[in-house]
């Protein structure tokens, strides 16, 4: 019987992975590209709109204020209305708002306000539009993948972050050279990179399935096995400790995980928004900057996928997360102490390995003790609080650059936040046994 159960598991998880993961990667690719393409647009947009480094850092990061405010309500709405409809809504609205970035001069002129204020306003709207997408997908994956698969699956999904820059950076650099119809390259960049999100919104409605019990593309025995396996894991967690939504939002472990995620996000966005500017200072063209900026993300993609597999194979989380954060801190801090282009890029690539490798492992931690609606709320509050670093990191980088004339101080601040995240991970209680639920058996004859 065990061999038969193993056969059903292999067959089922292969189907689920093949069906869901590639499509979700494409969706997150579009989301992340629309979130960070402002870093490339900056090369032309800041001079055109008269933005200082501090203004740009504030505008880039202010996205995360409204993202924070709407994160938990959005994830609870996803739990209520279903992932398919809610994720489609998110993608459609963020595609519209992201494309509107191209028309900042027109909107500012029409409303009689400054381009700077218009930039801030649209970034706030973009944060509200996109709120709930990432934690919604993480929650959605818990409805389909047992614990033993989650680090690698989240790693596959989140590989869209570095991949969006591996592919998107050269494209963004190229689009800065596109002109026509009275629009500059940075404006075409926003318009053309908003189109995939709008198209994918309709794809989500047609393609995603909310729950395994709705999956006509699974055989009956596969549906039964997966439903029983996930139910057994959920019961195992809830027998050990039951969480209400209110408790999930205030549990010390949830808040500690938010601190860890704050450090990881600060490293990610603090560098991502300014990486093109750092590289352009090497004396490269916009197109060359795009290709060189892709290098840390190539390394990050490898780290994310390989390290997630390694963590799953050993069913060990805390040590893996702490080591990845240490690598990130060393690489980022090291890059602050050199202006030699090749060495600086090598250190940023080393740091990128750690920044991206920690992410899939991190997201296995809250789902070891949260489930159901409490998981939707807990994941959302961790993501919301952690993503406030998406404001803090870019703002610190821009402010310190204007104050000192160098990005070195900003890189050291970010490295310090990553060290803090590592310390919290090591201190965090984690019961690995909660990831090992009884296996569901075969469907009854």
Image (tube, rainbow, N blue to C red):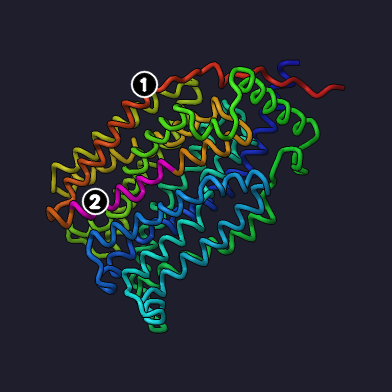
Circle 2 Cα neighbour tier, 10 Å, few/some/many (<14 / 14–19 / ≥20) = many
Q: Which residue is mark 2?
A: 397
Which residue occupies the foreground of this view, 256 or 191? 256
Answer with the quarter of the image where residue 241 lies: top right
Q: Earlier in the sequence, mark 1 or mark 2?
A: 2
Tell me if residue 187 comes above or below residue 1 in the rendering.
Answer: below
What separation in Å lies between label 1 and label 2 (alpha carbons)? 28 Å
Answer with the quarter of the image where residue 185 lies: bottom left
Q: Secondary structure at mark 1?
A: helix
Circle 1 Cα neighbour tier, 10 Å, few/some/many (<14 / 14–19 / ≥20) = few
Q: Residue furthest bottom?
A: 181
Tell me if residue 157 comes above or below residue 9 in the rendering.
Answer: below
Q: Which residue is mark 1?
A: 427
Principal secondary structure, stretch drawn in magenta = helix
Answer with the quarter of the image where residue 180 lies: bottom left
Q: Secondary structure at mark 2?
A: helix
Which residue range is magenta in the image? 385-400
Spot occupied by residue 315 in the image (x, y as percentages of width and height): 50, 21
Residue under the image location 68 percent in, 19 percent down: 439
Which residue occupies the foreground of this view, 158 or 170? 158
The answer to if 340 sits in the magenta stretch is no
User: Image quadrant for the C terminus?
Assistant: top right
Spot occupied by residue 240 in the image (x, y as percentages of width and height): 60, 17
User: Image quadrant for the N terminus?
Assistant: top right
Spot occupied by residue 426 in the image (x, y as percentages of width and height): 36, 22
Residue under the image location 41 percent in, 52 percent down: 64
Along the horizontal axis of the image, is 218 left or right of 430? right
Tell me if residue 29 comes above or below residue 417 in the rendering.
Answer: below
Whether tag 1 and tag 2 are in contact, CB under 8 A, the answer is no
Along the horizontal axis of the image, is 293 left or right of 52? right
Residue under the image location 46 percent in, 35 percent down: 360
């Amino acid at each position: 019987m065990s061999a038969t159960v193993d056969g059903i598991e292999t067959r089922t998880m292969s189907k689920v992975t093949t069906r869901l993961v590639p499509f979700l990667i494409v969706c997150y690719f579009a989301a992340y590209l629309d979130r960070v393409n402002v870093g490339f647009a900056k090369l032309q947009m800041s001079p055109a709109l008269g933005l200082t480094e501090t203004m740009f850092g504030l505008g880039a990061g202010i996205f995360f204020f409204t993202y924070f405010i709407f994160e938990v309500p959005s994830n609870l709405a996803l739990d209520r209305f279903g992932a398919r409809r809610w994720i489609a809504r998110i993608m459609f609205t963020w595609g519209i708002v992201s494309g509107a970035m191209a028309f900042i001069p027109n909107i500012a002129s029409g409303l009689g306000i400054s381009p700077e204020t218009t930039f801030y306003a649209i970034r706030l709207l973009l944060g509200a539009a996109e709120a709930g997408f990432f934690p919604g997908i993480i929650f959605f994956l818990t409805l389909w993948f047992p614990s033993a698969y989650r680090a690698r699956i989240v790693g596959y999904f989140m590989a869209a972050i570095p991949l969006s820059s591996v592919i998107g950076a050269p494209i963004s650099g190229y689009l800065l050279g596109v002109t026509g119809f009275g629009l500059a390259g940075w404006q075409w960049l926003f318009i053309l990179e908003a189109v995939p999100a709008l198209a994918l919104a309709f794809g989500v409605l047609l393609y995603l399935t909310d729950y395994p019990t709705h999956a006509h593309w699974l055989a009956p025995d596969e549906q039964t096995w997966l439903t029983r396996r996930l139910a057994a894991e959920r019961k195992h967690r809830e027998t050990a400790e039951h969480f209400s939504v209110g408790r999930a939002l205030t549990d010390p472990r949830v808040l500690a995980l938010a601190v860890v995620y704050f450090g990881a996000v600060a490293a990610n966005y603090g560098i991502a928004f300014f990486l093109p500017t750092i590289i352009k200072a090497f004396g490269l063209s916009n197109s060359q900057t795009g290709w060189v900026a892709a290098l840390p993300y190539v390394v990050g993609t490898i780290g994310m996928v390989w390290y997630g597999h390694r963590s799953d194979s050993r069913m060990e989380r805390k040590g893996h997360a702490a080591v990845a954060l240490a690598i990130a801190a060393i690489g980022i801090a090291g890059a602050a102490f050199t202006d030699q282009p090749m060495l600086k890029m090598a250190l940023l690539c080393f740091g990128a390995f750690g920044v991206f490798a920690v992410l899939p492992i991190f997201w296995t931690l809250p789902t070891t003790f949260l489930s159901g609606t409490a998981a939707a709320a807990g994941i959302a509050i961790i993501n919301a609080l952690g993503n406030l670093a998406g404001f803090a990191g870019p703002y610190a980088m821009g402010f310190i650059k204007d104050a000192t004339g160098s990005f070195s101080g900003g890189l050291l601040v970010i490295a310090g936040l990553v060290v803090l995240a590592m310390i919290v991970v090591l201190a965090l209680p984690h019961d690995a046994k909660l990831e090992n639920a009884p296996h569901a058996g075969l469907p009854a004859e």
